[in-house]
Amino acid sequence: MRYAILLLGAPYSCQASHSALRFARAVVERGHHLETVFFYHDGVQNAARLAAPPQDEPHLVDAWTTLHSEHGTSLQVCIAAALRRGLLDAREAVRHGKQGHSVEPPFELTGLGQLVDLGLSCDRLVTFGP
Amino acid sequence: MRYAILLLGAPYSCQASHSALRFARAVVERGHHLETVFFYHDGVQNAARLAAPPQDEPHLVDAWTTLHSEHGTSLQVCIAAALRRGLLDAREAVRHGKQGHSVEPPFELTGLGQLVDLGLSCDRLVTFGP
Amino acid sequence: MLLHILNRSPAASRVYQQALAAMGPEDRLLLIEDGVQGALPQLVRYFDGLQGRLFALREDLAARGLEGRCEASVQVVDVDGFVDLTEEAERTVSWY
Amino acid sequence: MLLHILNRSPAASRVYQQALAAMGPEDRLLLIEDGVQGALPQLVRYFDGLQGRLFALREDLAARGLEGRCEASVQVVDVDGFVDLTEEAERTVSWY
Amino acid sequence: MTEPTPSDLLVILRHGPHGTNWLREGLDAALVAAAFGRRVSLLFMGEGVTALLRGQQAGPLGQKGTSATLEMLEMYDIETLLVEEAALERFGLTEADLMLPVRRLSAEAISRQPGAHRLVLTF
Amino acid sequence: MTEPTPSDLLVILRHGPHGTNWLREGLDAALVAAAFGRRVSLLFMGEGVTALLRGQQAGPLGQKGTSATLEMLEMYDIETLLVEEAALERFGLTEADLMLPVRRLSAEAISRQPGAHRLVLTF
């Protein structure tokens, strides 16, 4: 089946990111195709490239990147939710006159329309909230 | 009286930052001294220098900076809570081998001990949670 | 006398029970943010026993279209009144 | 048949009421994260009427020291069982 | 009672205005879906019913709130506004208190909604 | 009942382990205060009582949890662990289920705690 995940919680504030990652790994191990993880609301914080969690805690930003490289899952971040929370890629930083950026590939800033398409085109969309 | 504020909520996710800012302004207008706003838990997101909210919304990061420059209120951010959430100043970025930074003065990364001292030394500590 | 501050609606969260449990007999309770829903006649019963010690923040009522809907027993204060309440109380305790 | 997913404890949040209100007569409910507290014998009564349709996630029970404490009527599944449940349901609805 | 044609998307709104960003971000999802030609229903549950109250204002720092967005729903052809009847009662509200016409749903009718839509998003 | 000497700081813990970061960040505040020589009391309310359950484990991705931190409390001279009696009952727990010795507080005793400390932090 074609799966997608919607993640609405910030890492290191609530368990939603851990739950989503654990579910994501179980889905791909089962042989399903996990097309996309879509990050919305505080979930956009999962794309924060500067996150420096304690070394004895799972590094969630890196874990999403690994999921992408091993299984081709796209990591889509709602651009409107990201901008207001200080998450900009290099291109948006230029557009908003900011020095430096806080999001980088494989995370992609994208519109909310992608979430709706994803939800309607995949067989299963599973949401993890805070 | 000497006041301090503890802010635990992220801007643009809940009203806590708005409430804290509104209260802060009322406190200084009354002639009290607002010594410090301490940012902890998701409140550390108030220091995100890259935040680019819609232009018709209050810009909270800028508003805190204005409060600091007009009233000398120090803006202290719990360093442990900030690091795991991707909020690093230039010095911490170097220490953690990251390119770029997401926090800059007048926000200062500091230890949690400051919060306890503040709470015990000020006349009033008012907490705004998410 | 302490000032307790509650920002969640009793219709949505059980945290109001914790605030009530921790309040001393002279303590006051200020409803802010979504907490101001507790000033509605149908919800104010959750705060029985606080007569004269229950406050709600005017600006948060107004933003939500609730200003004219409060139970009369709830004392409506603006943000300056909020500062007053913190001055008068020995300390504040927030419930969220 | 839909799978509803609840991650909050009925002891702390009223959101379980919304999940229950939105469930059809064949729908299933999976408790995850802090929601697994609802599998405790003293809290499971909030889910009366879901006999045979109430599940709890083993890993979240175990992390909280609750694995041996569940009411027997709650079906405990691991994360692979969670995937099974999503396969079997037409779609999922999350409550948080 | 005749049911309207099922929509593609059910957006469940469970939060009031101003206190959190959930209502705004939920409405944004609904508007985007409608702009892309999807049929969208909104279901206001619990505290979410207060989103529909008349007389809302900007926040004290100039925060926009969400009532202007609600007024645009019709322009986006979002006309199915479902409201949890029990929640209206809990808050002591009647339809006259609301800024838009709504369809009141009994508990039983609510339990049929998630199954009647291809996609359900809860905010 | 004799009351112990009032502490400087009351930290109220209202969340269980793993689900959110509140418990960890609340305990961190307590430990820092104690390390700086402050007298600290912890009050476990509501869901917070589950923080004390025996037999907790790391999360499935290796998340540490908070039980190891609780075991360090004594080393930091944090010995006043207050627990809401009503919450224990709500969860069906007895003191034998808890990893540390605690003092059970009635509703009336809880209502005296915030006034008996110079600073109260709720997490």
Image (cartoon, coloured by chain):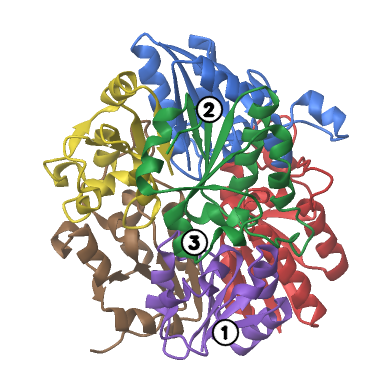
Chain colours: A red, B blue, C yellow, D purple, E brown, F green
Task: Find disc 1 in the rendering and name its residue.
Answer: D72
Give the Cα distance between marks 2 and 3.
49 Å
Task: Find disc 2 in the rendering and name its residue.
Answer: F7
Q: How far across and how far down the image is residue A74, in percent?
A: 75, 64
Q: Nearer the viewer, mark 2 or mark 3?
A: 2
Which quadrant: the N terminus of chain E?
A: bottom left
Residue D81 in which image quadrant: bottom right
| Residue E29 badge | 3
Q: Nearer the viewer, mark 1 or mark 2?
A: 2
Q: Is residue E87 left or right of residue B107?
A: left
Vertical relation: E31 (above or below) D94: above
Give the Cα distance between marks 1 and 2.
43 Å
> Regarding mark 2 in the picture, which secondary structure is present there?
loop
Vertical relation: C78 (above or below) A112: above
| Residue F16 badge | none
Amino acid type, label 3: Ala
Amino acid type, label 2: Ser
Question: At 74% across and 36% down in the image, what residue appears?
Answer: F75
Question: At 69% across and 40% down in the image, what residue appears?
Answer: F73
Q: Using a 10 Å C-alpha cutoff, classify the residue at mark 3 as few (fewer than 14 neighbours), some (14 to 19) or many (20 or more).
A: many
Q: Is residue E110 left or right of residue F72?
A: left
| Residue E123 visible, this orientation | no
> Regarding mark 3 in the picture, which secondary structure is present there?
helix
Q: How far across and how far down the image is residue F81, in percent?
A: 57, 42
Q: Could you say which is closer to the camera, residue A101 or residue F31?
A: F31
Labels 2 and 3 positioned on one and the same chain: no
